[in-house]
Image (cartoon, rainbow, N blue to C red):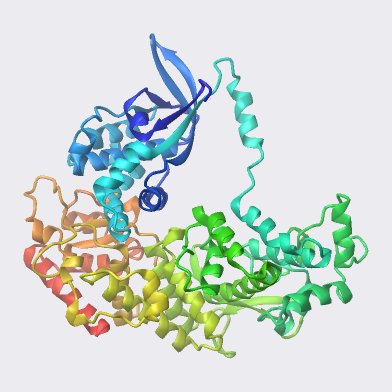
Amino acid sequence: MAKDIEQLTVKDLLEKSEYRIPIYQRNYTWGVEETTQLIQDIADYAKDDPNSNYYIGNLIVFPRFNNGEGYYETIDGQQRTTTLSIIACSIQAHKPVLLSWYKKINVSFDHRENSNYTLNAIYKDPSSRLDDDEINVDIIGVYNKSWSIIERICRDKELDLDVFVAYLLNQVIILRIEVPKETNLNHYFEIMNSRGEQLEQHEIIKAKLMDPIKDDNIDMATFNLIWEACSNMDRYVQMNFYKDIRITIFDNNGTGKLVSSFDEISSNLTKNIKVDNSDENEKSLSCLFNEDEIGILYKKPWEDTIEKEVPESYHSIISFPNFLLHILKIMFPNNSEIVLDDKKLLKIFKRVIEQSDDQKAFAKNFIVTLLDLRVLFDKYIIKRNQEKWSLKQLLPQKSQKDKYYYKDTFSKDTDPEEIEAPDNRMIIMLLSMFHVSAPTPTNKHWMNAALNYIYHHRNASSSDYSEYLFKLAKAYMLDRYLAIEQIPFEMIIYSNKTNPINNIELANWNGINIDDSIQVGENVENFVFNFYDYLLWLESNKTDFDYSYRTSVEHFYPQHPTNQEPMEYRSLHSFGNLCLISRGMNSKFTNNLPGAKNENFGSVLEMKSYSLKLQDMMNCIKRGNKWDENEISKKEQEAKELFIKYLN
């Protein structure tokens, strides 16, 4: 390996050399989601391939000297490098013997004293109180959650914590690449910003799927047309086709379900369909394919201004590569090799394609199933729309059939468009509850379950769908978070059909810090809090409550109160004293006593953004109640009774 390219273990990275983040680089911005994904990736390899190294990426550096001392100016890779330092601090706080060699933080920021102060504080004395105006909120947020994330992922994968740490330190490899000293950095940045990206895994899969049909130009063109339409996840898939094609593939004037097989689509496209390509003459699909052969570029429908019939601002909650795995899992539910991890996308697809007896038939079947499930995904899985959750279907205007609009998926014809239908609201609450609890792609088992249900129950009513989702939530609680022995998500979805194996009489309440002992401390799963909020919502039906990305577990009575004695461990970590808050609120709430929290952050406007559990806590203070061990015990028992009521 060239001298300017060096393989470093994470231990090498953290122990040797100095790394400085220059001021022209953005500040640290990673959060719990990115950190969870990083830890999940490492744990996957530590469990599934423990004898191999895991290459985590590149660290691009520029060697510099200052007062005779050398250091590396970090050009690319600072987010990952900083996160590894934070994780190391978290491990050191809980397993110090494993990091006895870790003598200092070797990452620093130029002219960002808050970030430097925070990094050094969590290394030297992580339990000390940090002043709100001196800290980097993102660094603290990741530090506070890192160890609980490691514990949860290792527990789910049945991976020993010491084994995980050893693999992280000694077998996770980062490539440190030195930019030559004579490099013009301004020119280098221009190159970095304009460089072409490597071929992605899903593009390789597309080529592999198309290989069996490569001798038929029309089949290839049909496959490509569908694939490209499905790959744009932020538009309803029907709108990714030109109008004339759309109305032959889908019913209800091109807005409804898929009505054609692969061969029917190919036949209709070549025989009957004309495509309006901007100002040019109408062209058949075969003509467009021939033009592509000689380099005439074909505009995709969503790139053409004439196809923007309806303004859209929807954002998918999942990427196209991960969506491909959901399709494959629904097609082959009993294949344990198919997991929702897009790092393994190429490996999984290669294996499934190789196992197919008729690869040509498989390619056609897969692409049609992909399109079919994209239609169902758009209609039955939430999207984000202008900071709100949305569950809508595409429909043709009654007066103008060539115009379209969006309406709540579950609504009556008589419902006004501007008022959300009650049945729709119920399902949005359930879906968003699942999503914000597990926003990372590899944890979207709930979405696979919902898609699988709709795929096999196409005429499901709103009550059918909401009942299924609530049963799934109950199975999560009874078979995962209240279970003595956790049941795998795949078994919950495909083997048990969401009928919980456990019942409420077998609940391990200590697993969520209710009853005699505290089993998990502050590491109660986010889903438990969000499910409890859902039950509170059912009881109160607060119309202005929505789920958002609240990812930090907060002690309402703080762990390190200002000028006050700490509360005893049992009450401090009780479910009655815990709630979820956003990362931004975490630093504000940290060491304030409940009364001060209410005084400083208890306005009507601010309360609207809080979880219902936190609102309930705040309201106790507003009523003049003292937030002590007795009040916490009371809230804990109220929660238990509500869980029992709905989980029975």
Eyeballing the image, is 425 above or below 370?
below
In percent of width and height, residue 52 lies at: 41, 43
Instruction: Please give left or right for residue 453 compared with residue 369 in the image.
Output: left
Question: Looking at the image, which residue sits at the far right?
Answer: 281
| Position above or below: 173 against 444 | above
Looking at the picture, how far across and down is residue 521, in whole percent?
17, 57
| Image point (47%, 73%), residue name | 334
Give the x, y percent position of residue 504: 21, 81
Pick out the residue farthest to the top.
68
Judged left or right of residue 58, residue 580 is left
Q: Give the side of residue 33 with respect to residue 264, left or right.
A: left
Q: Quadrant of residue 259?
A: bottom right
Q: Quadrant of the C terminus?
A: bottom left
Q: Is residue 276 visible?
A: no
Residue at 56% of width from left, 60% of height from top?
Answer: 351
Looking at this view, is 460 or 113 the one in front? Answer: 460
Q: How many marks?
A: 0
Q: Position of residue 174 (x, y in %)?
A: 44, 35
Could you say which is closer to the camera, residue 180 or residue 43? 43
- For the question of whether residue 416 can be seen, the reply is yes
For the residue pair 567 and 443, the one nearer the viewer reads as 443
Q: Quadrant of residue 412?
A: bottom right
Observer-nearest residue: 525 or 38? 38
